Image: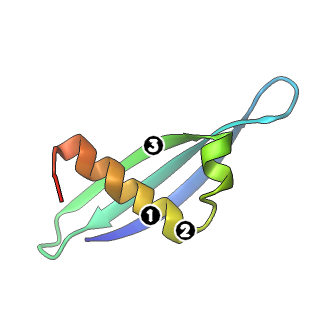
Amino acid sequence: MKINIISVNFRYDRENNLKDVIVRFNCVDEHFDNLSGGYTLTAEEYEGNKSNESLAVIAEEKLKDSLGVTS
């Protein structure tokens, strides 16, 4: 499964502090099935996972969880 991060959008509170981050992704498997999705990270969660690689790993975990796939 190949996961691509499409966008990372930042939401701020009224004091202009980072509130959370919305990550959108798509993935294609070996059969060319295509899925798109997204998830939200808190500012603290995002701080330790800023790279595309880290965001893709989280996307894969969340996708598997939502599909009920166990590894």
In three-dimensional space, the C-alpha distance between marks 3 and 1, rounded to whole angstroms, equals: 11 Å
In the figure, is residue 10 to the left or right of 66?
A: right
Dot 2 amino acid type: Asn
In three-dimensional space, the C-alpha distance between marks 2 and 3, rounded to whole angstroms, equals: 14 Å
Which residue corresponds to the image point at 47% horizontal and 51% vertical from the top-left? Answer: 24
Q: Neighbour class for label 2 at 10 Å: few (<14), some, many (≥20)?
A: some
- Work out whether mark 3 precedes mark 1 in sequence or the reverse, and give the earlier one: 3
In the figure, is residue 30 to the left or right of 36?
A: left
- Which color mode does the image show? rainbow
In three-dimensional space, the C-alpha distance between marks 1 and 2, rounded to whole angstroms, equals: 6 Å
Secondary-structure class at tag 1: helix
Q: Position of residue 22 (x, y in %)?
A: 56, 43
Secondary-structure class at tag 3: strand
Instruction: Kindly check if marks 2 and 3 are in contact, taking CB atoms under 8 A apart as contact.
Output: no
Q: How many marks?
A: 3
Which residue corresponds to the image point at 17% horizontal and 72% vertical from the top-left? Answer: 32
Q: Position of residue 17 (x, y in %)?
A: 82, 35
Dot 1 amino acid type: Ala
- Work out whether mark 2 precedes mark 3 in sequence or the reverse, and give the earlier one: 3
Task: Using the image, determine if residue 4 lies above or below residue 11.
Answer: below
Most foreground residue, 10 or 67: 67
Q: Position of residue 26 (x, y in %)?
A: 36, 60
Most foreground residue, 44 or 32: 44
The residue that mark 3 highlights is: 39
Instruction: Kindly check if marks 1 and 2 are in contact, taking CB atoms under 8 A apart as contact.
Output: yes
Q: Extreme bottom residue here?
A: 30
Residue 52 - label? 2
Q: Position of residue 12 (x, y in %)?
A: 75, 33
Secondary-structure class at tag 2: helix
The residue that mark 1 highlights is: 56
Dot 3 amino acid type: Tyr
Which residue corresponds to the image point at 16% horizontal and 53% vertical from the top-left? Answer: 70
